[in-house]
Amino acid sequence: MSFIKTMSHLDKIISELLSNAIVIKCPNDTVQKKYNQFIDLVGERFSQCSDKQLEIADKKLCSIKLDSKVFSLGLAVKINLARRFIEHGLPDRPICINIINPVYQERARMSPHSKENPFGENTILEKIKIFNQLELLSSNKLSIKFWIVDDACPERSGKLAEQIIKKNFPNQFGNKYHILYLKDAIRKGLYPPKNAINGSIKGASIHYALKTILDCNTNEQEKNLFLDTDADLSIHPELLGLLLKKYYANNAVAVIGSRRQKDSLAIIGHLRDIRGRLYIAILQKLLPTLGLANILDTNRAAKLYNTLAAKAVVKYQSLWQFPYQIETILNLLEKFPGQIYPQGISYFDSIPLSTATRRFTYYKQIIDQVYLSDKFQSREYEYGLKQLLLHMGVKNWHFFEKNVPLIILKTPIDKLKDLPIKKILLRCMPK
């Protein structure tokens, strides 16, 4: 089949499937029976297409105007690419994937959807169900362990997760499915108290889980990989297959899942999106190493590490709050140059139950960016911009979050690094 005929054939399939796409209104929709049937339909319609042709279809969907149906089909295509790799592309050896899932005030998401809990996602059981399916699809080359970390949650989210697992998988609790409590590590003096200046929250939870897994790993015949993920369903669990594909294709040390690459599909709340662009603009300016590695999205929890990377994270991490993820990526880029890769993912913002805005101010993350720039660049690098940010204060920062300069909104993500950010902020600073 010629290239032109192949393109025409793909366009026809895409057009047909778009007209039948299941509209996704929230992350929970992506794990429902109706959408699973659509994923299977997409797999059937592309069954005679090669992996390369399916990748072309993926790129096409990532390049057209995004709406709920494009997202729906794009996610289904990515899931089918992931399934193909897990079924046919994995090396012929045992691989253990350690899924690290912090839970902070996640009781509602971990509970089923209902009239009383309209945003419930039943996340623990849904994820475990999908992980079990992936193990079977891999002909049991994969064994997936699930590490839930209660990061000092006042609502005791970990206790609910423990109850769910003990009720549904009593024989696998503590073996395949684990609960860790960050409070235990804080009591032992391993991490600073939660309410300290650099108090322990999610960053400490990921570090604690990685350290615990590395300390108890005794099976040298099994390759261990580690996935830093979020508690919700904003990233479909099957997209693990895409991270694995990128990892093995490039002999990588780590793969960074991203909402902002050209091969990404992301539906992000408007305010979050524009605030995120401002954040990324400053990040690229202060930490150019990230842009050189084409890593455009650092705060998304979809990061795959091998044992070398996990050990480096445990050894060099110093931030226990956000933006610990940025520090992690910078450390890995420094220790393993050329071996850290981004991977576009599909992402549907899970806004209603988000704890982000309740836990910290993004201005603190900006201050931490200055600290990281001093550490990984130099104190003199972009000195004027750093001083502006340090003395801006929370009030002015909140103004910019709500009034992001138009030039930042219109500039492509990968070109933000070229903007004179200090001049733009000074020009737009409220009187």
Image (cartoon, rainbow, N blue to C red):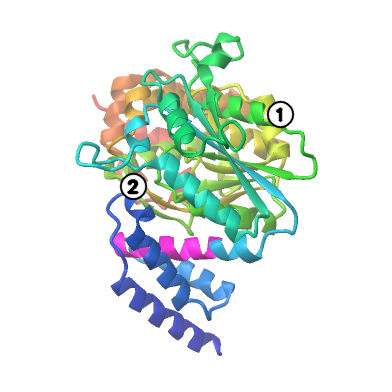
- Quadrant, the N terminus: bottom right
User: What residue is drawn where x is 61% and y is 14%?
Assistant: 190
N-terminal of the pair, mark 1 or mark 2, is 1
Please name the predominant secondary structure of the magenta segment in the image: helix
* Contact between labelled residues 2 and 1, with CB atoms less than 8 Å apart: no
Q: Is residue 142 magenta?
A: no
- Identify the secondary structure beneath mark 2: loop
Start-end of magenta stretch:
67-82
Q: Which label was assigned to residue 394? A: none
Left or right position of 157 against 193: left
Crowdedness near tag 1: few (<14), some (14–19) or many (≥20) residues, C-alpha within 10 Å: few
Q: Position of residue 138 (x, y in %)?
A: 62, 59
Q: Which residue is at the front of the view, 257 or 368?
A: 257
User: Distance of mark 1 from mark 2, alpha carbons?
Assistant: 38 Å
Q: Is residue 418 visible?
A: no
Residue 78 magenta: yes
The residue under label 1 is 216
Answer with left or right where residue 14 lies relative to residue 319: left
Number of numbered discs: 2
SS category of the residue bearing label 1: helix
Name the residue at the right extreme. 220
